[in-house]
Image (cartoon, rainbow, N blue to C red):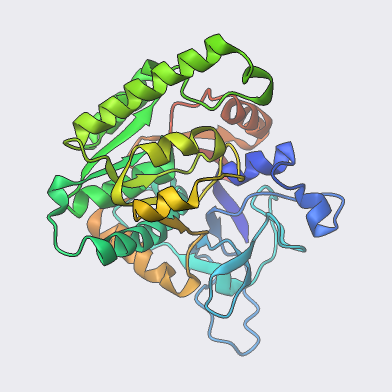
C-alpha cells in the first residue's frame, strides 16, 4: 500500500522525545518508522485464500492494532511499540490487509476529514465506557442538568460532540482565539485557558517558590469557580482528562459526586496519584481506555458517515512530506491552531 494522508498524533511526539518510553529500545530495533493513523491506497493484495476487506485500488483507513488481546483490544500499537511494524511515514510498505477499513463508497466527506478518524474512533470508545459507568450510579437523571468538561485536544473535542448529542452541557478549554471560536461554532462552551496561567502543577524546582504557589492557588480557585457556575454548583459529571499529571488534581477537584474522570491519553504525564479514601467517599469512577476494539471499527466508521460526526470541513492543516520535521516541531511547541494536523505522503 501507499499512504496518502497521515494524522500527526501525540504518540508520534512521545516517540520523538523518547518519553514516556523509548520505542526503539522497547522494540529492540535501531530505528522505527512512525505513523499509525491515516488514509492509504491499496496497491496489491495477496489473498492467500482468505476473505479480506480490501481490494486493489481501495482507499482505506489503517487500524493501529499491532498485537491484540483475547477481546480484540490493542495491547501494542502498530508503528509505535509493536515490533516489526512500519508506519505511514514510509512511501510504500506492506501490512496485514485485515488492518485496513475501506473508506465508504460515495462518501460525503473529503479524505482530509477521514484522515483525522483516529481521534474520533478513540473518542467513541472512551465515551461509551465513561457514559456507561456514569449511568451505573446516576440512573435516570436528565443529562441536561449535568456538565461534561474537557481539557483541550482533538479527542476531547470529538468526545464532547458525543456528549452534546446525548443531551449534556459541554465545555472545553482552548488557548487561542482561533480554537475558542471553533468550539463556540460547534456548540461547545469555550473556556479560555489563558485566564488561568498558573494552573499547571509546579515542577520540582518551582515547588519551593511561594509566589508560584500563590499564583497557582489563585488560578485553581478561579477555574473551579467557573466549573461551579457552569454546573449549577455540582461540578463536572464527566471530566475528559487526556493531559495527565500537571492538571490531575484540578480535574479531581472539579469533579461532581458520582462523577467520572475519563482518559484515553497522557499528553503531559502518565504517573498520577490521588487519595483513595476521598475518591471512594465521593463515589468517583476512574475510566482508562486505549485505542478501541477492532471489530467495532466498521460500526464507528458507519456512524461517522451517517451522522456527520467527523472532523469539520476545512478544520485540518496539511504539511507536505518534506515538511514533516517542521510539523513535528510545530506540534511540540503548540504552534498549530488546528486540532487535526495531517501530513501528505503521496498524491491522491
Image location of residue 320, percent across then percent down: 59, 34
Query: Measured along the vertical axis of the image, is residue 39 above or below residue 343?
Result: below
Residue pictured at 76% horizontal, 63% vertical: 83
Residue at 59 percent of width and 26 percent of height: 330
Residue at image position (32%, 65%) is: 302
Task: Answer whether residue 269 is visible to the viewer in this image.
Answer: yes
Q: How far from the left and from the top, in percent, is residue 29?
A: 85, 55
Q: Nearer the viewer, residue 26 or 270?
A: 270
Taking the view exactly as shown, the residue that stands out farthest to the top is 211
Query: In the figure, 326 relative to 269: above or below?
Result: above
Q: Quadrant of the N terminus?
A: bottom right
Q: Which residue occupies the foreground of this view, 125 or 286?
A: 286
Q: Nearer the viewer, residue 162 or 243?
A: 243
Examine the image and state in which quarter residue 174 appears: top left
Residue 230 placement, left or right of 319: left
Q: Residue at x 42, y 62 (%)?
A: 103
Amino acid at each position: 500500500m501507499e499512504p496518502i494522508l497521515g494524522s500527526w498524533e501525540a504518540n508520534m511526539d512521545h516517540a520523538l522525545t523518547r518519553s514516556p518510553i523509548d520505542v526503539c529500545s522497547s522494540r529492540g530495533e535501531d530505528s522505527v518508522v512512525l505513523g499509525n493513523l491515516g488514509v492509504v491506497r491499496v496497491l496489491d493484495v495477496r489473498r492467500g485464500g482468505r476473505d479480506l476487506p480490501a481490494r486493489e485500488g481501495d482507499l482505506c483507513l489503517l487500524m493501529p492494532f499491532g498485537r491484540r488481546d483475547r477481546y480484540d483490544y490493542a495491547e501494542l500499537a502498530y508503528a509505535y511499540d509493536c515490533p516489526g511494524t512500519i508506519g505511514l511515514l514510509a512511501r510504500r510498505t506492506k501490512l496485514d490487509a485485515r488492518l485496513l477499513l475501506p473508506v465508504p463508497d460515495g462518501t460525503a466527506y473529503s479524505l482530509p476529514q477521514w484522515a483525522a478518524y483516529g481521534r474520533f474512533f478513540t473518542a467513541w470508545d472512551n465515551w461509551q465506557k465513561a457514559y456507561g459507568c456514569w449511568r451505573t450510579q446516576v440512573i435516570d437523571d436528565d443529562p441536561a442538568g449535568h456538565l461534561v468538561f474537557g481539557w483541550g485536544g482533538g479527542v476531547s473535542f470529538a468526545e464532547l460532540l458525543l456528549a452534546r448529542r446525548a443531551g449534556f452541557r459541554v465545555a472545553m478549554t482552548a488557548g487561542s482565539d482561533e480554537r475558542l471560536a471553533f468550539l463556540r461554532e460547534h456548540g461547545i462552551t469555550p473556556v479560555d485557558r489563558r485566564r488561568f496561567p498558573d494552573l499547571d502543577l509546579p515542577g520540582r524546582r518551582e515547588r519551593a517558590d511561594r509566589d508560584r504557589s500563590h499564583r497557582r492557588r489563585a488560578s485553581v480557585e478561579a477555574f473551579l469557580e467557573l466549573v461551579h457556575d457552569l454546573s449549577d454548583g455540582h461540578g463536572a459529571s464527566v471530566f475528559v482528562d487526556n493531559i495527565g499529571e500537571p492538571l490531575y488534581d484540578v480535574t479531581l477537584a472539579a469533579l461532581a459526586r458520582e462523577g467520572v474522570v475519563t482518559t484515553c491519553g497522557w499528553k503531559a504525564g502518565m504517573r498520577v496519584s490521588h487519595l483513595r479514601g476521598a475518591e471512594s467517599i465521593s463515589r468517583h469512577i476512574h475510566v482508562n481506555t486505549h485505542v478501541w476494539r477492532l471489530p467495532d471499527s466498521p460500526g464507528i466508521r458507519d456512524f461517522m458517515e451517517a451522522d456527520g460526526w467527523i472532523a469539520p470541513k476545512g478544520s485540518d492543516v496539511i504539511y507536505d512530506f518534506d515538511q514533516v520535521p517542521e510539523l513535528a516541531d510545530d506540534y511540540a511547541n503548540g504552534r498549530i491552531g488546528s486540532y487535526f494536523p495531517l501530513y501528505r505522503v503521496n498524491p491522491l
